[in-house]
Amino acid sequence: MTVITRFAPSPTGFLHIGGARTALFNWLFARHHGGQYLLRIEDTDRERSTPEAITAIIEGLRWLELDWDGEVIYQSERLPRHAEVVQTLLDAGRAYRCYCTSEELTEMRENARAEGRPMRYDGRWRDRDPSEAPAGVPPVIRLKAPQDGETIIHDAVQGDVRIGNEQLDDMVLLRSDGTPVYMLSVVVDDHDMGITHVIRGVDHLTNAARQMQLYQSLDWAVPQFAHVPLIHGPDGAKLSKRHGALGVEAYREMGYLPEALRNYLLRLGWSHGDEEIISTMQATEWFELSEIGRSAARFDFAKLENLNGHYMREAANDRLVGLALPRIEALIGRAVDEDGRALLTAGMDGLKQRAKTLVELAESAVFYVSRPNFPLANEKAAKLLAGDGVALLGAAAERISGIADWRAPQLEEAVRVLAEERGLGLGKLAQPLRAAIAGSNVSPGIFDVMEVLGREETMTRLRAVRG
């Protein structure tokens, strides 16, 4: 059997973090088994579905590098097929026309509320002759569902879930205007696409029983269901925007790398021993549904940042420069030329060690392509140059100016000797140098920075601060 999975978002908003994890699990399972991963846009809700949302979903998946097989399938283009399937059920006596008026349905709803029970259609048109239909009432088409026994969902994550059939009424398949309902469209599309495994959030578990009844009424094979736990906030409450329930594009803007977000989402509900840092290649090799837990996962920005920091340090320098450059140019208000790009690339080894996001990386890299001015905007840096700071800076500048071999070890040794001569620790000279050259009290190793900037630029910055 060829494994075929699908991700089937409704384009009524952005690709949220829970949807991204669902897409990842489907992608990994298909890739692990050498199967196919398909993308279906469930856009039958014409009022709420928007082109902007479709674009956001597709771009979000592409940024996460969760490539799908074949063309995107749009559910709205398959409405005739959905209606065709309902006709086969009608012809087989497994569905029927229901002519209940809105007033009758309201009465059923009010009675259920008064009796403290869920609203269920009472089946009054299940076996009635259509000749009794009231004039002017367009019918809905309902499934003739089993009324006794139970429906059992054999779920790969949740185990066997049993639901008494008396709890399920005859669900609507086609509305009175002839449009299909969600339950019908999903089953028909999954069958026609050959979906073997339906991997989705546990909030869809209640839909699975009704969908199973429809599969059985059509004599179709039921796919393997796998309902994964939801994602909660760190406090255990339902995930909200303050917790991280944002669109994937927001994480991109916040400066996270796609491989870091994939790794983090993987660990939200799935585990492989004590492994935390798992490459996509390794995840593809290891991923199985049996390792998905049943408990809700908790989203934690601190863990995501730490993971992202790891992947930042592992990333190629030229790639990081390319990713950070638009942010740097926005901060300095101008384009960075080739010389500036070369400086950023040369200095990236030091820059990426501290940054946990591309935002932090850009902010810390600005000094390479934008010479700091005096007085410095960074108050802590300015304090380093107060008092005898500028005088110490002058002595350091004079000492290093004659160094022939302009490399970090030689620069550090010269400043260390000067500090010892004056009875000072190295930091008493290195910190004013950092403030003058980087315009901040924090930076990569200042002697490494001086090597990257070169003799001319370093001395120019030192002279500018000394006036």
Image (spheres, rainbow, N blue to C red):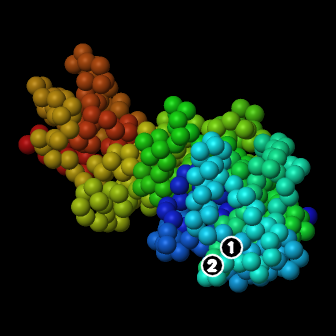
CA separation, marks 1 and 2?
6 Å
Image location of residue 20, percent across then percent down: 59, 55
Q: Are marks 1 and 2 in contact (CB under 8 Å)?
A: yes
**Location of residue 62 by image quarter:** bottom right
Image location of residue 219, percent across then percent down: 90, 68
Q: Is residue 246 above or below residue 356?
A: below
**Location of residue 405 by image quarter:** top left
Compared across the picture, whether 419 is left or right of 23 comes to left
Q: Which residue is drawn at the image coordinates 42% and 50% (left, top)? A: 254
The amino acid beneath tag 1 is: Tyr
**Disc 1: which residue:** 99
Compared across the picture, whether 11 is left or right of 219 comes to left
**Disc 2: which residue:** 137
Which residue is at the front of the view, 290 or 424? Answer: 290
| Dot 2: element | loop
The amino acid beneath tag 2 is: Val
Q: Which residue is drawn at the image coordinates 29% and 66% (left, top)? A: 335
Quick one: quadrant of the C terminus?
top left
Q: Which residue is drawn at the image coordinates 58% and 36% (left, top)? A: 298
Neighbour tally class for label 2: few under 14, some 14-19, many 20 plus, Cα within 10 Å: few
Compared across the picture, whether 167 is left or right of 445 comes to right
Which residue is at the front of the view, 283 or 170? Answer: 170
Q: Residue furthest top?
A: 423
